[in-house]
């Protein structure tokens, strides 16, 4: 498709073949190009411009640009007479890649970069301007698309070459001169193979074959030759050039130097690999609270990361003489390779690491002034693992003490770099945090065990006096005549003792769960009947809410611990009433879901945020905004969840803040 030119009334000289080829070249480019006269009226445009604008401008009538609306990237409207083309014509100064947003008639907004360039006559007077519009809308969709769009840049910055189907160069712009070092008169009329390394000549045959079939070659990465014989990494976009009869007569080639990109990609790939390793190690050590597991993963990963022949972690635990350290983990070598030669002692080489002075790296440790100073070996003992390249990184706790050291060795010199130092140091920091956490976790586990033991013993010991106290109060209450003024107080005391007894029972259940001793007694019963009985029981004791039972299931037999399932239902209903103080209704439903019995309890209270829902089934956890004005210890849902899990079922919640909550549990019917 050729560039559309507005015929002018005055007589013009006919275009030369070279002009026609340039015209055809611009017309087929996937880049929008148009021109304006010195007054700003559009005089020509290519099909890419029409497609970009979404409309066909009127030549000689539309001013500055074919776009109906123009905005800044921030969405601020730009008057058409202040667009990049208008400013270029007014000032005679070109604009380099100014980003604007155009809005098409169909409402679609497109991000573009504009490259308007002024055109001057022989006397230096401005006669018009040509504008190249690059569509960058898809640039943010991905790195591949970004790379593609990066190749479509203004003609002044990109080498553009045209050639015949025989590979003879027919046009050569200024950017091509700068890229390849040849002036246009040195290459026009010569074969394009001038730029192709001998081992890559087959690429030209392949490319020309595609062009003859009207196929476009996009972003083909290869190497081309500079005039000096230096190979340049480039990206090629090759398009067929067609005559007015739509016959392929040649090809246009956009060549982009990607030297910096390749260097960046190499650097980025190296950086990415290291980051992935660090992230992997961080994830591995954060997922474990086992000290040996943490250290082994760290040792294995960093040995691989540094390319060391072997690596080891030594704990900073001195013997009675204060001179040796304990090997804890090893990678790349058998443990015997170290142990049969004894543990490292407090020598000049090791002291720098274990004293926390910092990282020690040596291209050849045998040439270090610290090496070979200590009796009896004065260096490595005979038969020891060969260490020439040496790297040692201390692992320091947050309190500043040296936990131990990571040591790496290789039989060849110069294997470790500053980058290895930094990477291992980063891993060592992660490891130190993980080790501190592991030690803290171990201490917490011990304290937790003592706490659980105390809760179990205290709850058991409280059970007897509470039971006795309840019995005595019942006796007193039974002996009081009806109407006695003390009778209501006895009843209130019994109610409070009932709450206390239930709390003690829950604490005992928690203790049993923690020790794995929560008993379950299975029997067959009608779940719908149980739910209705619990509702009747709770409805009798609560006056603030109406409990509505909705179920199409008349009978649903299950095999489970009836008392424990009843405990779960009571807990869910009690919570629904307690946590919806401004509502007056609670819905309960029972459904048969193909071999699974499902119970749902819906309240219309304050609801629970999604980020808190995963925690509410934890022991002693309470939602902060609820805990301030509603009593409880946060163990009811924990116990309920354990009971349902032991029935091979599941308990979950569906809720949004302000819209109440639905607690559901399922258990097998078989």
Image: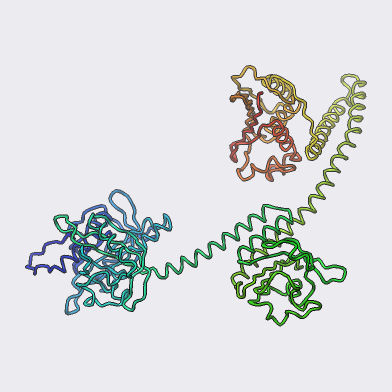
Q: Residue at x 80, y 47 (%)?
A: 448
Q: Would you place residue 259 above or below residue 107 in this image?
A: below
Q: Position of residue 460 (x, y in %)?
A: 88, 36
Q: Position of residue 522 (x, y in %)?
A: 75, 24
Q: Quadrant of residue 17?
A: bottom left
Q: Residue furthest front?
A: 383
Q: Would you place residue 59 above or below residue 177 in this image?
A: above
Q: Residue at x 67, y 65 (%)?
A: 310
Q: Is residue 623 visible?
A: yes
Quadrant (top left, top right, bottom left, bottom right) of the N terminus: bottom left
| Image side of residue 498 versus residue 128, left or right | right
Q: Camera-side residue: 430 or 475?
A: 430
Q: Quadrant of residue 164?
A: bottom left
| Image side of residue 667 versus residue 10, left or right | right
Q: Residue furthest bottom?
A: 369
Q: Position of residue 474 (x, y in %)?
A: 89, 24
Q: Camera-side residue: 617 or 9?
A: 617
Q: Camera-side residue: 122 or 582?
A: 122
């Amino acid at each position: 498709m050729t560039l559309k030119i507005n015929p002018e009334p005055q007589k013009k000289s006919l275009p030369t073949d070279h002009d026609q080829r340039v015209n055809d070249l611009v017309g087929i480019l996937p880049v929008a190009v148009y021109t304006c006269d010195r007054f700003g009226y559009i005089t020509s445009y290519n099909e890419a411009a029409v497609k970009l604008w979404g409309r066909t401008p009127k030549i000689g009538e539309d001013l500055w640009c074919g776009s109906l609306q123009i905005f800044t990237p921030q969405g601020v409207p730009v008057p058409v007479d202040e667009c990049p083309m208008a400013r270029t014509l007014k000032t005679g100064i070109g604009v380099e890649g100014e980003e604007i947003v155009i809005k098409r008639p169909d409402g679609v907004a497109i991000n573009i970069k504009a490259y308007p360039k002024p055109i001057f006559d022989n006397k230096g007077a401005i006669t018009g301007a040509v504008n190249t519009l690059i569509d960058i809308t898809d640039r943010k969709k991905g790195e591949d698309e970004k790379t593609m769009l990066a190749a479509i840049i203004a003609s002044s910055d990109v080498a553009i070459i045209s050639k015949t189907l025989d590979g003879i160069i027919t046009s050569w712009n200024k950017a091509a001169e700068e890229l390849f070092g040849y002036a246009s008169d040195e290459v026009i009329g010569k074969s394009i193979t001038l730029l192709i390394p001998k081992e890559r000549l087959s690429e030209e045959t392949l490319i020309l074959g595609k062009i003859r079939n009207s196929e476009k070659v996009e972003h083909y990465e290869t190497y081309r030759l500079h005039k000096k014989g230096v190979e340049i990494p480039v990206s090629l976009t090759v398009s067929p050039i067609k005559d007015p009869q739509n016959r392929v007569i040649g090809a246009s080639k956009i060549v982009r130097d990607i030297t910096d990109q390749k260097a960046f990609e190499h650097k980025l790939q190296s950086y990415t690999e290291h980051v992935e390793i660090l992230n992997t190690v961080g994830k591995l050590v954060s997922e474990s609270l086992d000290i040996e597991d943490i250290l082994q993963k760290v040792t294995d990963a960093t040995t691989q990361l540094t390319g060391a022949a072997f690596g080891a972690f030594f704990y900073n635990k001195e013997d009675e003489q204060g001179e040796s350290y304990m090997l804890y983990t090893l990678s790349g070598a058998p443990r015997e390779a170290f142990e049969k030669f004894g543990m490292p002692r407090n020598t000049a080489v090791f002291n720098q690491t274990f004293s926390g002075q910092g990282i020690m790296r040596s291209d050849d440790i045998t040439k270090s002034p610290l090496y070979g100073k200590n009796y009896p070996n004065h260096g490595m003992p005979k038969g020891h693992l060969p260490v020439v390249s040496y790297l040692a990184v201390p692992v320091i706790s947050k309190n500043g003490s040296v936990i131990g050291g990571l040591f790496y060795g290789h039989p060849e010199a110069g294997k470790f770099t500053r980058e290895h130092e930094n990477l291992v140091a980063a891993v060592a920091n992660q490891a130190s945090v993980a080790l501190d956490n592991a030690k803290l976790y171990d201490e917490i586990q011990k304290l937790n065990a003592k706490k659980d033991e105390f809760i179990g013993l205290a709850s058991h010991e409280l059970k007897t006096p509470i039971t006795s106290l309840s019995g005595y109060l019942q006796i007193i209450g039974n002996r009081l005549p009806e109407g006695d003024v003390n009778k209501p107080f006895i009843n209130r005391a019994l109610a409070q003792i009932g709450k206390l007894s239930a709390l003690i029972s829950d604490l005992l259940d928690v203790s049993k769960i923690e020790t794995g001793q929560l008993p379950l007694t299975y029997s067959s019963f009608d779940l719908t009947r149980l739910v209705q009985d619990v509702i009747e029981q709770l409805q009798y004791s609560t006056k603030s809410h109406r409990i509505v039972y909705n179920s199409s299931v008349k009978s649903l037999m299950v095999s489970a611990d009836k008392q424990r399932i009843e405990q779960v239902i009571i807990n869910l209903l009690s919570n629904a009433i307690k946590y919806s103080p401004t509502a007056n209704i609670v819905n309960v439903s029972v459904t048969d879901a193909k071999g699974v019995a499902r119970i749902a309890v819906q309240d219309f209270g304050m609801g629970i945020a999604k980020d808190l829902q995963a925690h509410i089934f934890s022991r002693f956890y309470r939602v902060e905004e609820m805990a301030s004005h509603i009593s409880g210890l946060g163990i009811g849902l924990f116990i309920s969840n354990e009971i349902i899990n032991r029935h091979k079922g599941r308990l979950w919640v569906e809720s949004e803040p302000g819209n109440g909550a639905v607690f559901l549990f399922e258990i097998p019917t078989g």
